[in-house]
Image (tube, coloured by chain):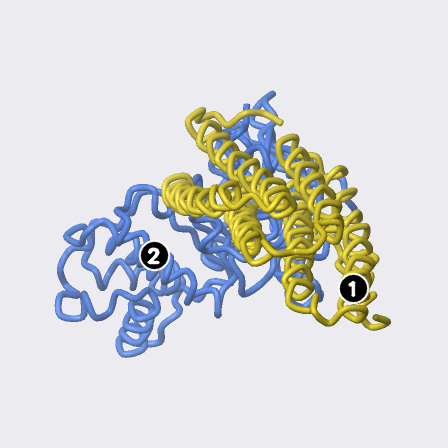
Amino acid sequence: MAAADDNLSEWSPSAAKDAESVKVRCHNVSVMYGDRVGLKDVSLNIPDRAVTALIGPSGCGKSSFLRCLNRMNDTIPDAQVSGEIIINGVNVNSADVDPVALRASVGMVFQNPNPFPKSIFDNVAYGPRIHALADGKEALEAIVHRSLRRAGLWDEVKDRLSEPGTSLSGGQQQRLCIARAIAVSPDMILMDEPCSSLDPVATARIEELIDELRARYCIVIVTHSLQQAARVSQQTAFFHLGKLVEMDDTGRIFTNPAEGRTHDYITGRFG
Amino acid sequence: MNDHIVTAFTDELEQLSNDLLRMGGLAEAMITDACSATMRGDLVAASAVIERDREVDELEAAVEQRIMEIVARRQPMARDLREVLAALKVANELERVGDLSKNIAKRASALGNLATRDVLKGVDRMGRAVASQLSGVLDAYRNRDECLARRYWEADEDIDQLYNSYFREVLTYMIEDPRTIGDGAHILFMAKNLERIGDHATNVAELIYFFVTGNYLDAQERPKIDGLAKS
């Protein structure tokens, strides 16, 4: 269990027990939006090759925290981020970190599928092209095909790669966006409510995909669906009023959380 | 503890709890009535106990149905989840108490020709102790009182003690006069049934402790008397 004020060294859920399995170390991360506190002194470790779910009521800071991981808060004019976020030994807030390169290695999938107005192929090829990851046409095709396969979309689109990405169904578009994120060989994938606009079948497909992807990637997902958090994640962090209340193994959080506030939230007693 | 934002969920859990308490009350009365009917050789009262077991079985089925619906519709978490899972098991424990009480009542007719009913005083003693144990456990359930649950969990030792001493007493009758062996065997079965009811009450106490605290009582900790080895 890690309460907000705990020393990092005391934090030891099973998935992040040994140092090697920790992908991200966050220490005293705070976000201010002008005078308003978005996030306050959040310290936690995110395990690699596992899914970490961030839960909490609207405005609790979970999305603010997610956006810190790939410096998306930079795009908000009055946002100020402080504290350390160490990914692969590098503090992502250092002046010498290029946010564009960072966002390639820390990919993001948003609430509403947002394919580019391009073909299915070009949607996935876009990242590898601008980051010059492919040496020649064949290499680029190989990346696109592999990414679509890993996103579980290949069988559905292999014969229509030149059709617009927007011609796909909502669930397929979201998997296309995941394929696009994977195509640039990221270290991590951030997902902000990835299934909130999808029907139960499309949601199940994305959840199945998340489960497969965690073998290769560190995944952090923000979700309002507690059942989804319980289904897809190995670790769950509960945020409230900009603070981390508790982070623990998902099984523990949903059966016997340590903190009363976590308990009241997940049992629908909050407020 | 705060109520759920969705009040219907709180109501459903309360109804579940009420059903279980009703089941528990029925089972408790069955113990007392079964022992009393046997003591008095009252076959009509014994039949009434046997008949009431069906009611307990029906309540168990209703509780199961209610739990299935709660799980499907509310997807309970944390303490709510523990409460619902515990309720499923408590219902099963209480159903067993009903069955065992029925078995005791069934023996009333077999003991019709008992020379002296004094030998049944031990059944009465055990019956009262066991019913009081179950009653206390049900109080702990009603009040979600893990401390009380723990106290009754520990008190199972007293019932084991009563059983062991009664076992020896009946055995003595049987040794002294082999003609009593048939009756004695029936009485020993009744005593064993009552001892088992005590175990079921203890299990309910464990379940209460689990759902309220999220932790398990350690079975190794509880003093367990096994006097039979010496008998």
Picture layout, residue A160 above or below residue A33: below
The single residue placed furthest to the bottom in the displayed view is A138
In space, the residues marked 2 and 1 are separated at their CA atoms by: 73 Å
Confirm whether residue B201 shows in the render: yes
In the image, A97 versus B40, the foreground residue is: B40
Confirm whether residue A84 shows in the render: no
In the image, B81 versus A41, the foreground residue is: B81
Picture layout, residue A240 above or below residue A45: above
Q: Which chain carries label 2?
A: A
**Judging from the image, what secondary structure is the residue with disc 2 in?**
helix
Residue B8, percent across and down?
Answer: 41, 27
Callout 2 touching callout 1 (CB < 8 Å): no
In the image, B144 versus B94, the foreground residue is: B94
Kindly identify which numbered label has been placed on residue A242: none
Q: Mark 1 lies on which chain?
A: B
Residue bearing the label numbered 1: B173
In the image, B69 versus A85, the foreground residue is: B69
Residue bearing the label numbered 2: A206
Q: How crowded is mark 1: few (under 14 residues within 10 Å), some or many (20 or more)?
A: some
Left or right: residue A107 compared with residue B107: left
Specify the quadrant of the image occupied by residue A238.
top right
Which color is chain A depicted in? blue
Task: Look at 29% across and 47% down and name the residue there.
Answer: A113
